[in-house]
Amino acid sequence: MSTRLCALAASVALLTALAVPAAAADPGAAAGSGAPTVNLATNPGFELPSPNLADWGSVPGWNCTGGPAEAAVTTTAAHSGTSALTVTPANADSTGECAQTVDVQPDTTYTASAWVRGNFVHLGATGTGHDVAPAWTATTSGGWQQLTTRFTTGPNARSIRLYVHGWYQQGPFSVDDVRVDGPAPAPAVAAGSIPTTDKVVFFTVDDGWQRTPEAERFIADHHLPITAFPLPMPAGTDPGFFKRVTAVPGSSVQDHSVSHSDLSKLPLEQQQVEICDARDTMTRLFGTAPVVFRPPFFTWNTDTLQAAANCGIRTVLTADADFSWGASNIWHPGLLQPGDVVLMHWTDALAADLPRALAAAEAAGLKPAGLVDYLH
């Protein structure tokens, strides 16, 4: 018997010992919250289009270990709707895992489920705070079968990793209609400034397409805490730059969507893809999950606040001053005030915009400070 088949046999024995009977999904299983029970999964039916500027071949809302070489959205024989995810492991060492981060509440019960087709398909969650056996099936005999698992989060759990995968040398599998049923999180809070009496102001810099050594040097020389809101594509092109310009204590990299679209024109589900996928990229590149979202064009609606919350974002932040491209616009009377958020952009003009913004802060008796330190 091959090594992989031996591992399969051992896994089956272990899972049989651990697994509970596969019950039907119970959306009412979310305990300890008065919030309505909703499906928290991102792109659960694989029906949503990839945002502009997304990585080629990516599956919106999902991270697949084999990338487009293994995982693709197909339109043949979906469980419901028009699309499903089909994964074809590329070699004998791959299980074809696809996963996503789902934000959760501590000490709360959730029910995860998915319809699958194939052999030895597994559905599970990690990071719950407790050991949870995955749901699995030896075969679906060519049809669709629902897998269901239930878990209660620990006291420190804020997010879990939901995964689905096949098994070594067991061929392709398909997934559709994923659910993580639990209480809806409270919507994020919209803000244009930060309530504080401290004599501080907050410098935020968006996008990231133009990165100059002059701006980088000014930030380092003046020890400026910067809150960067890069898009995933420029951040992924030059992550070292953003690590350097956010090296001052109090600095951070936050979320600015995938495609820089007007999110107010998109349904909640597509807004969630935009925000969650950007969050995942920033977390992977910089090691810390964003907690602030800057809506492109400062346009947002109530769906934006809920989508942001579903992605673990606590604050949807605009600004009340703009010092981009030579501007010196303060959108209230007088000088900058404590708690003001200043907008700038990563452009070839930033090296001149930064000293002008710093001079405006000093004229008001204010100092730049770390944004996240004052939010949370």
Image: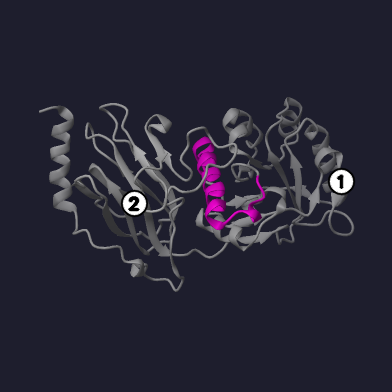
Q: What is the x, y in percent for residue 86? A: 35, 40
Which residue matches tag 1?
Answer: 328
Q: Residue 37 vs residue 212: left or right? A: left
Q: How is the image coloured?
A: one colour
Of the pair 268 and 276, the residue shown nearer to us: 268
What's the residue type where badge 2 is placed? Answer: His
* Mark 1 → mark 2, Cα distance in angstroms: 55 Å
Q: Secondary structure at mark 1?
A: loop
The answer to whether residue 127 of the structure is visible from this angle is no
Q: Residue 374 vs residue 181: left or right? A: right
Whether residue 281 appears in magenta in the rendering, the answer is yes
Q: On screen, 219 above or below 22?
A: above
Q: Secondary structure at mark 2?
A: loop
Q: What is the x, y in percent for residue 100? A: 42, 46
Q: Quadrant of the N terminus?
A: top left
Of the pair 250 and 126, the residue shown nearer to us: 126
Residue range in magenta is: 261-288
Badge 1: how crowded within 10 Å, few (<14), some, or many (20+)? some
Q: On screen, 106 above or below 251?
A: below
Badge 2: how crowded within 10 Å, few (<14), some, or many (20+)? some
The answer to whether residue 261 of the structure is visible from this angle is yes
Locate residue 245: give its quadrant. top right
Residue at 75%, 33% in the rendered image: 347
Q: On screen, 108 above or below 83?
A: below
What's the residue type where badge 1 is placed? Answer: Ser
Q: On screen, 212 above or below 59?
A: above
Residue at 29%, 31% in the rendered image: 94
Q: Residue 74 vs residue 167: left or right? A: right
Which residue matches tag 2?
Answer: 79
Residue at 52%, 39% in the rendered image: 281
* Disc on the earlier residue, 1 or 2: 2
